[in-house]
Image: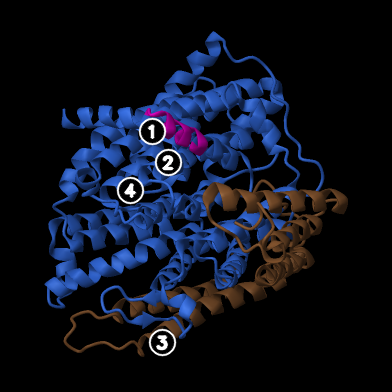
Amino acid sequence: MIPEKSSAKVEEYAFGGLVAVVGAFTLIDATTIAARADNAVGPRAFPYAVGALLIVTGVAAIVATARGRLGQAEEGEDVDTGVRTDWVTVAKLVAVLVAHLVLIDVVGWPVAATVLFFGAAWTLGAVWWRALPIAVVLALVVQVVFAYGLGLSLPAGIFEGVPFLDG
Amino acid sequence: MGSLTALLEGFATAAQPEYLLYALLGVTLGTAVGVLPGIGPAMTVALLLPLTYTLDPTAALIIFAGIYYGGMYGGSTTSILLNTPGESASIVTALEGNRMARAGRGAAALATAAIGSFVAGTIATVLLTLLAPTIADIAVTLGPADYVALMVVAFTTVAALLGSSPLRGLASLGLGLFIGLVGTDTLTGQQRFTLGVPTLADGIDVVVVAVGMFAVGEALYVASRLRHGPIEVIPVGGKWMNREFWARSWKPWLRGTFIGFPIGTVPAGGADVSTFLSYAAEKKLSKRPEEFGKGAIEGVAGPEAANNAAAAGVLVPLLTLGLPTTATAAVIVAAFQSYGIQPGPLLFTNNSAMVWALIASLYIGNVMLLVLNLPLVKIWVKVLQIPRPYLYAGILLFAALGTYAVNFVVDDLIVLMVIGVAGFFMRRHGYPVAPLVVGMILGPMAEEQLRRTLQISEGSLAALVTSPFAAIAYSVLVVLLVVATVMRLRRKKSEVPV
């Protein structure tokens, strides 16, 4: 826990700053919304209020951080608050998600879903030869259920024209 | 007597085999997601939204209500049997229930939680049945300024009163309000904050935000600090069907119910506050206060009942005013809206058959949940043991699937990822995610009412506070804030070691 404190502080400044930046963007972009003068309250007023709220809370978060009042990380059943952040795992999961969304239009949903489930399970420590068949079966079952059970056809991709899989 | 007839008709609808099946599906799913760490009812309802468009609204809402009630039951099983702290609403249960389970009295702890949830859920649903039509009658007379006041109260309580850090709650609310702004302005048809991107012109879908925050954000966060090693589930031991069990449980159940329901109804603290109050009350009233902290059954019975009663109480403002005060309630409002129904005072006149079928299904759902969680609890113990890599991989897969199924465009998945990463950092730094979801869903409604008020008053801001109802609402809010601040300061004082 302790060695992470200084980097936690940097992150906390960054997040507070981000909130304030979103607020500034809201205020600036709100001025470009066309509003008729005769309108008592146009489409700008509420965005101004939201922008102000974001700037105030963002700055307040930065001030609180400077005073040493850091946010309390959330607890959970599967969360071990005593360990250091495993950034590699987080990066891998984001990469798997990116791969999934890129692959949907290229090779179809079943393959993209297999990549997502297998990639995520493997990253999190599952044995690959057990995760792979589960991923394949799960993806195909969902594809069939969607096509025939719900009448929503997910892009079949490389399985186009294959009975059952192409809804 | 009008509402009794309506309720009976509701039962006639909800008891049809088809709707019974939907209710069973809802409560089963709800218990499952309540038991499983990492997913909750809010996200489950959001995920199912795109898949239920083909159902009729009554069926879909019966499923969602089942998930909502079921999640409350399931959560207690986890906190009693798992060796680690659980979702906030059931932490107090974890304290006593976990100790009981370790002492070999797990069966009694599970039974008092399940039966207490049933008793509280049923009594609270009766209170809901009695109260809701009356409140709806009063609510019909409310003007736009009154709604603005109610929403300000809801925003403030959800953001500033519930979490540990009011500042971070408000920041989260602000982000949610901002997300709600993105899209086309309903009154003037102008695009706002869309950056010229066509995908954003229709606004960001509730499903994408809720799933991104709750599923992707949670999965990334858990992955960053995953508890490795075997999942230790405490074996269920002991007998519970004895006189001592009933004698020590029934009073805490009733007290918990009457503490929880009002707190859920008045948006003043949600489930957490009600469980803590109930726990404190039981400890004070107990003849054996020394047992508290070591496995006192009253400490499970009371808070569990309070938790469920509060959950039912939340439905009162939800159905009569259209005012969500928890993340799950907010997603349910979005579900109503996706069917073109606006929850609020007119619900009981315009969609009377549907809303009474929904209320009737709550009674039925409670009975189903008692069966699912008492004799069948062993099944959930198995569910609890799902290996975590597969659990979180599955959460990510279904999160992506649910998001993609909204519009079948990949752009939504990009938005999902951005929101998921934001949710990850919010969890790391103690920003609660519920205010964001509530803000996003309630924000556009608040803006509409605000503009309507000021249009009628021709721009005079005084109109916001001159209505007697609004004035009362703001005064109550001020009192609540003062009380909360005093309590916070006191707690801080008591934390300082002397």
In the image, residue A34 above or below residue B276: below
Check disc 2 and report the residue beneath it: B65
Instruction: Indicate yes or no whether the magenta region holds residue B18.
Output: yes
Residues flagged by tags 3 and 2 on a common chain: no
**Is residue B311 among what the camera can see?**
yes
Say which of marks 4 and 2 sits in front. Answer: 2
Viewer-proximal residue, A63 or B239?
Answer: B239
Q: Provide the secondary structure element on which disc 2 rests.
A: helix
Q: Give the number of the disc on residue B361.
A: 1
Q: Provide the secondary structure element on which disc 4 rests.
A: helix
Which residue is pictured at 25% across the width and 45% down the height?
B351
Q: Provide the secondary structure element on which disc 3 rests.
A: helix
**What color is chain A drawn in?**
brown
**What color is chain B drawn in?**
blue
Q: Amino acid at mark 2?
A: Ala
Spatial CA distance of label 2 from label 1 is 8 Å
Spatial CA distance of label 4 from label 2 is 12 Å
Image quadrant for the N terminus of chain B? top left
Which residue is pictured at 16% across the width and 51% down the height?
B140
Q: Magenta span covers which residues? A: B15-26
Check disc 3 and report the residue beneath it: A29
Residues flagged by tags 3 and 4 on a common chain: no
